[in-house]
């Protein structure tokens, strides 16, 4: 019985992992504007972390910038939820402009 439960658990784990990677690849293929916006947010997150790690940015400033990025990500999700899981070019442009402002704050 233990062996059967273990086997079932392994099979379920493999199914979840494969469906997750399929969903991610499908996301990237079918939502290029969302992917672009979210990739920039991930990149900015890494830049902030590196600045703090290197001592070039205070943790307080990093927290503020992370908050800005979370707001942008939240807005992106809200926009996508209203448009069949897509964002329009106009929405992408607006989000990118917000990301540009945050990016400049990371540099300074």
Image: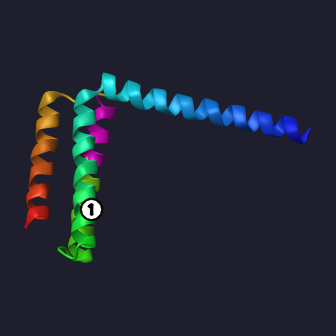
**Is residue 55 left or right of 11 when viewed as pictured?**
left
Mark 1 Cα shell of 10 Å, populated few (<14), some (14-19), many (≥20):
few
69, 103: nearer the viewer? 103
Residue 99 left/right relative to 23: left
Quadrant in the picture for the C terminus: bottom left
Lateral position of residue 27 relative to residue 87, left or right: right
Whole-percent x and y of residue 44? 22, 54
Instruction: Name the spot of residue 49 as percent of width and height, x first.
Output: 28, 64
Residue position marked by numbered label 1 in the rendering: 67
Which residue is at a point 24% across and 69% down the rendered structure image? 62
Residue that appears at 27% across and 56% down: 45
Residue 72, percent across and down? Answer: 23, 49
Report the residue that reaches farthest toward the right: 1
Location of residue 92 (image quadrant): top left
Using the image, determine if residue 13 lies above or below residue 86. Answer: below
Q: How is the image coloured?
A: rainbow
Figure quadrant of the N terminus:
top right
Q: Position of residue 77 (x, y in %)?
A: 31, 40
Look at the image and say whether residue 72 sits in the magenta stretch.
no
Main SS of the magenta segment? Answer: helix
The residue depicted at 88 percent of the width and 42 percent of the height is 2
Q: Nearer the viewer, residue 91 or 38?
A: 38
Write the residue at 29% across / 27% down. Answer: 31
Secondary structure of the residue carrying tag 1 is: helix
20, above or below 105, in the image: above
**Which span of residues is magenta-colored?**
73-83
């Amino acid at each position: 019985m233990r062996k059967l439960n273990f086997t079932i658990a392994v099979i379920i784990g493999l199914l979840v992992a494969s469906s997750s990677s399929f969903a991610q690849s499908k996301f990237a293929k079918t939502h290029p504007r969302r992917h672009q916006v979210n990739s920039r947010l991930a990149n900015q997150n890494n830049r902030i972390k590196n600045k703090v790690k290197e001592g070039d940015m205070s943790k307080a400033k990093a927290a503020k910038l992370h908050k800005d990025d979370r707001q942008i990500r939240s807005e992106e999700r809200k926009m996508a939820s209203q448009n069949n899981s897509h964002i329009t070019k106009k929405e992408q442009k607006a989000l990118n402009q917000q990301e540009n402002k945050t990016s400049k704050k990371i540099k300074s």
